[in-house]
Image (spheres, rainbow, N blue to C red):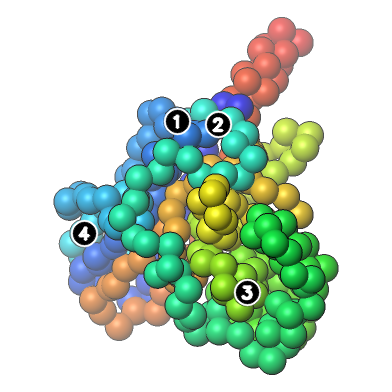
Amino acid sequence: MKLRIFHQTVYRYDRPVRNLVQSLRLTPSVCEGQRTHDWQIEVTGGIRGPGFRDGAGDWIEGWTVRGPTEEVVVTISGRVETRDTAGVLRGHRELIHPLAYGRDTAATRADAALKDLAGSVTDSADSLDLAHKLSAAVADAIAYAPGRTEFHTTAAEALAQGEGVCQDHAHALISVARRRDLPARYVSGYLQASAAGEAHEASHAWAEIHVERLGWVGFDPANRCCPDERYVRLGSGLDALDAAPIRGIAAGQGAETLDVAVNVEEVDRFQNQSQSQRQS
């Protein structure tokens, strides 16, 4: 599948900020199943700093904006060619040992309810089968309901209210997988979600669980599937904060608001629609 991606984040401040420093994890992963073309990152008024590939294999760029400024726009655009690898992450070079992802964070720490959910899944001699069962259990326990949780909502809180979004599903799956001694981590990326080919208007998140003999395998409880050709992987971390595509700090007293727009569209479909419109 050939996907065209446009992702724009606009930061606004009620008072001018003097300087802004950002760390961007916004370049698609280098791995089997996806190949990146014409990828552009732009920051209005920004100065691109050094980039590096971290131990998890993610490409990170530093940007600086010299103020005073009341608005900063981060724009990403490009094309990614994808294919289905049944959720298995292959060809991704990283240095961090999988056991490092057994450590809990505030977002993934298990309370009694999460421990009970992890324990409710029947034992399996096959870790892949166990991972699938855990993903299904999270999907059953937390209904997809946009707007009911926030960025700082924890896995325990989402489970308690029985509702959440993809971030909450990922955090909960990470938590229960770790309870069953399976290393797990958070993944940020994009999803061309509609089976009808309509553009998906938000970034996406899922979890990866380390499975014997296979390595890292992705699971998306929000959509009850493993990542396929509709998914584009950006980066990973212990939780949403650790894997955030944009992290930064501003020097000043202004209150910050942000608007995010994401468009993921199949290129061939877009081109066919454009040709039909020109012919009509």
The residue that disc 2 covers is 82
Q: Residues within 10 Å of mark 2 (few under 14, many from 20)?
A: some
Residue at x-position 29% and y-position 62%: 22
**Residue ranking furthest to the top:** 279
Residue 269 left/right relative to 248 = right
**Amino acid identity at mark 2:** Thr
**Amino acid identity at mark 3:** Arg
Distance, label 1 to label 4, CA atoms, is 28 Å
Mark identifier at residue 35: 1
The residue that disc 4 covers is 64
**Amino acid identity at mark 4:** Thr
The residue that disc 3 covers is 180
**Amino acid identity at mark 1:** Arg
Q: Quadrant of the C terminus?
A: top right
Is residue 213 visible to the viewer in this orientation of the structure?
yes
Point out the frontmost of discs 2 and 3: 3
**Residue ranking furthest to the front:** 125
x then y, percent, for residue 28: 42, 43
In-front residue for pair 113/8: 113
2 or 3: tag closer to the N-terminus: 2
- What SS does tag 2 mark? strand
x then y, percent, for residue 13: 38, 71
1 or 2: tag closer to the N-terminus: 1
| Up/down of 134 relative to 179, above or below | above
The answer to whether the residue labelled 1 contacts the one labelled 2, judged by CB atoms less than 8 Å apart, is yes
Residue at x-position 47% and y-position 81%: 105
1 or 4: tag closer to the N-terminus: 1
Tell me the quarter of the picture where residue 171 sits.
Answer: bottom right
Residue 4 left/right relative to 142 = left
- What SS does tag 4 mark? strand
The answer to whether the residue labelled 3 contacts the one labelled 4, judged by CB atoms less than 8 Å apart, is no
The answer to whether the residue labelled 1 contacts the one labelled 3, judged by CB atoms less than 8 Å apart, is no
